[in-house]
Amino acid sequence: MKENSRLKLNTSDMIQRIFTIALFVISSLLLTGNVVGQRVSFGLYATEGLLITPLGSRDLNFNSKQHILLPDQKVTINLNDDATAILTITGRLDQEITVTIDAPSTLDLDESNTILLAVKFAYSNLGAVTEDLAKKGAVEVATGFTSATFPILRRSLTLSPTVSTPPTPGHAGYIAPTGTAYLFLYGTLGTIPSDAAAGIYRGTINVHVSYAKN
């Protein structure tokens, strides 16, 4: 299917914040020798009829979880943390979607300075109207898996034995209803090398969303 919607997010709109962190990192390094900064940005790609929207700060920032990053430590952002990156996916309710996460294994300052990165993700398709409610009903994708297929809106499960009515099949003049699912990205940075140089360690996570093939 021809890709006609491509949204590339980078760090250009966060330059001032990056410099603030970098200056803090450098001055702290001179005092303690224990500080590293980092930033992860997103590349978002959706096929026709799908829309991906980043919420909040639009990046995954481990400094938001732990302001000072220390050598020989790991920093973990969990699903329910405020630092979790949040995206919404809007599309047709009568089709399933496939989300694929292409994440780097390291964040890099340069060829000689890298930090291990392990990314996890979860989705919520219960029709939640807030981020907090969406997190409570989120499905975490097992470690090691890079893709997941699910409907934009999961049909309600009740105690009644009656099966809910399936979506209306397409026909001439039919306009399929749309809905929104949440996607959460988080993970672990480190162990941070003991000789890591101060600076902004960067990486890009590419998120691809398409309608699942029948």
Image (cartoon, rainbow, N blue to C red):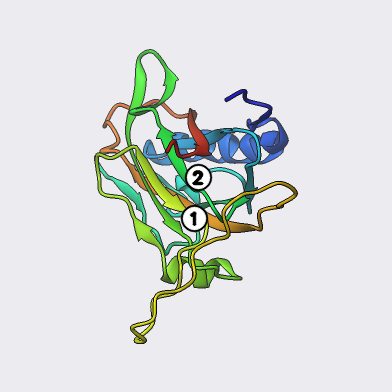
Q: Position of residue 162 (x, y in %)?
A: 39, 81
State the residue in front, 54 or 37: 54
Q: Is residue 90 visible?
A: no
State the residue in front, 76 or 17: 76
Q: Secondary structure at mark 1?
A: loop
Does 64 sit above or below residue 165? Answer: above
Q: Are marks 1 and 2 in contact (CB under 8 Å)?
A: yes
**Few, some or many residues within 10 Å of mark 2 (<14, 14–19, 20+):** many
Q: Position of residue 201 (x, y in %)?
A: 46, 29
Q: Residue at x 58, y 59 (%)?
A: 168
Q: Amino acid at mark 2?
A: Asn
Residue hosting label 2: 61
Determine which quarter of the picture holds residue 10. Answer: top right
Q: Position of residue 117 (x, y in %)?
A: 34, 35
Residue hosting label 1: 83
**Few, some or many residues within 10 Å of mark 1 (<14, 14–19, 20+):** many
Q: Amino acid at mark 1?
A: Ala
In which quadrant of the rendered image does the C terminus lie? top left
Determine which quarter of the picture holds residue 140. Answer: bottom left
